[in-house]
Image (spheres, rainbow, N blue to C red):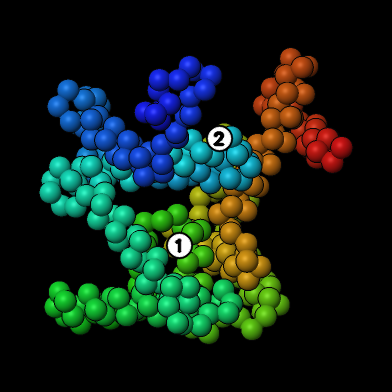
Amino acid sequence: MTCRFCAAHPPSFRLVVMPTTGERFERAVSIMARLRGPGGCPWDREQTFDTIKPYTLEEAYEVLEAIDARDWNGLPGELGDLLLQVLFYSQMAAEERRFSIDEVLDRLSDKLVNRHPHVFGDAKADTPADVLRNWQALKAEEKKKRQEETGEPAAAEKAHTESVLGGVSSAMPALMEAYKISSRVANVGFDWPNIEGLFDKLHEETDELRADLEEYPAPGPRPESAAGVAGARGVKAPDELRARLEDEVGDLLFVLVNIARYLTLDPESALRKTNRKFRRRFQYLEDQLRQKGRRPSEASLGEMELLWQESKQQEKR
């Protein structure tokens, strides 16, 4: 939009007034309403809360991918796609007279103020750990207040609600859930005293997995190259043994998540970076074989290993 006073002036002298953040947000909200309204987009109009859920997860991961890649040009677009999910849910809720984007914003602002009394009030929090402890205490207080307003829940439900692990969703990716669980219990002192204890636990879980593998029918697990399913080429393990192996592998992963937490690293992000590194190196291997008119399935393991090591050396240059 342009300044009315300057509209009469020649173009070279006009003062362009940029829209405010609020005006930009209102425009996005109105566009979403238009897409869902009469004569809007057929695809947008037929969506429901359930059909949009997969896109929400997808957009969240694309934001993380852009951050990991330090793609600062692409990140604004990915964040916009994620914000679209909030606008979409809010518009559908407004149509059903459940709530509107205004309530979403009000609750967000109120939560930010209420959960930061060390900024907006008189509370003290000198370290990030202090902030987290205050945050958890405030969340518990808010839950208690909601219970009083809506009526006491049943005993079992109340016990779950008051649990340290209450609010940790089991719908999130398993690595993230494990990180949240271990962080919550660590905040109340249920943690290893030092990282060496975690490595001892890692060795313990590895030994337990090896012990179970001794019961695996000969010739032992043999992954099928195409399917990647353990035991597909060899003898399949009995169901009871497979259940124990799954349990031990899960324990190993949980310990590794705790090691990441202890080092203040995000295990989800660490694994994504390793996935990208593996992709990059394997695609180098494929490119080198392609130049010779061959595919990985036509190369020996030894030849592929040499190319793999070559790809690692290429990255160091």
Q: CA distance from mark 1 to mark 2?
A: 28 Å
* Amino acid type, residue under disc 1 in the picture: Glu
Where is residue 309 drawn, in percent x and y?
A: 82, 39
Left or right: 308 with respect to 114?
Answer: right
User: Residue shown at 66%/68% (left/top)?
Assistant: 263
Considering depth in this image, is 156 or 140 the residue closer to the camera? Answer: 140
- The image shows residue 168 at horizontal and vertical percentages of 39, 66
Q: Quadrant of the N terminus?
A: top left
Query: In the rendered view of the protein, which quadrant contains the C terminus?
Result: top right
Q: Is residue 160 visible?
A: no
Q: Which residue is mark 1?
A: 177
- Seen at 64% across and 47% down, the residue is 273
Q: Which residue: 69% across, 30% down?
A: 283
- The mark closer to the camera, 1 or 2, is 2
Q: Which residue is mark 2?
A: 74
Please tell me in which quadrant of the rendered image residue 50 appears.
Answer: top left
Residue at x 33% of width, y 36% of height: 28
Vertical order, 124 against 49 (above or below): below
Residue type, mark 2 in image: Gly
